Amino acid sequence: MQNRPDITMDAVYTAPGYLFRRMQQIAVAIFIEECRDFDLTPVQYAALIAIRTHPGIDATRLSAVIAFDRSTLGSVIERLEAKGYIERKPAPEDKRVKLLYLTKAGSSLLRDIMPAVDRAQVRMLQPLKPADRKTLLALLAQLVDLNNEASRVPLRAEDALEHLGKVG
């Protein structure tokens, strides 16, 4: 066993994993603050956008499209349905499969929440210079793409209908 100096908190504070986790905490906090009047989480928002984009999507495909754990997504869907933002309908070919659709209330919510979501996105990057914002987003997109398969729930954007050239 090698003799290694003790790791300091400075080493923790500058580690990529720690910085990503902290930025995730900050991003969620900013989103929640800006969107507090709508009582919606970032994952619920992403699910609503995906359901609006792909009416009739099932939960398994929704999980792949938003890269969110399928078992946890069930409770997200239940909350959205309880709030009246989505409805579940049985698939014609298999009544056990439930297809997801945005309700009028869900469509209205997405229209109304957009300014708050936009403010949140701006706030997350506001401390950076415009050129640094662009660089950061490009590097993050590259890292996410190159490390996609390491995720517990890899993004499967190819499961989204617009990536297949089909209309939902």
Image (cartoon, helix red, strand yellow):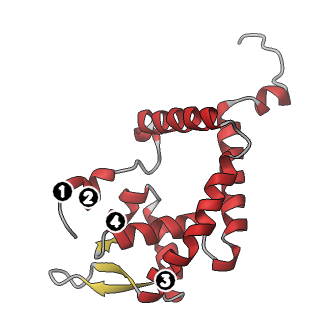
Label 1 close to label 2 by CB (< 8 Å): yes
Q: Amino acid at mark 4?
A: Thr
Question: Callout 3: few (<14), some (14-19), or many (20+) C-alpha neighbours within 10 Å?
Answer: few
Q: Which marked residue is nearer to the observer: mark 3 or mark 4? A: 3
Judging by the rendered image, the residue that carries numbered circle 3 is 108
Residue sitting at 59 percent across and 68 percent down?
115
Judging by the rendered image, the residue that carries numbered circle 1 is 165
Question: Callout 2: few (<14), some (14-19), or many (20+) C-alpha neighbours within 10 Å?
Answer: few
Q: Quadrant of the C terminus?
A: bottom left
Q: Which of the 4 quarters of the picture holds residue 61? A: bottom left
Q: Which of the 4 quarters of the picture holds residue 5? A: top right
Judging by the rendered image, the residue that carries numbered circle 4 is 60
Q: Quadrant of the N terminus?
A: top right
Residue 146 point in image, percent of width and height: 42, 33
Judging by the rendered image, the residue that carries numbered circle 2 is 162
Residue 2 point in image, percent of width and height: 72, 10
Compared with 130, 153 (above or below) is: below
* Nearer-N-terminus badge (2/3): 3
Q: Amino acid at mark 3?
A: Ser
Element under disc 4? helix
Side of 144 relative to 15 (left or right): left
Residue sitting at 65 percent across and 41 percent down?
20
Residue 108 point in image, percent of width and height: 49, 83
Q: Amino acid at mark 1?
A: Gly
- Number of numbered discs on residues: 4
Element under disc 1? loop
Side of 111 relative to 103 (left or right): right
Q: Which marked residue is nearer to the observer: mark 2 or mark 3? A: 3
Q: CA distance from mark 3 to mark 1?
A: 27 Å
Label 4 close to label 2 by CB (< 8 Å): no
Label 3 close to label 4 by CB (< 8 Å): no
Side of 29 relative to 43 (left or right): right
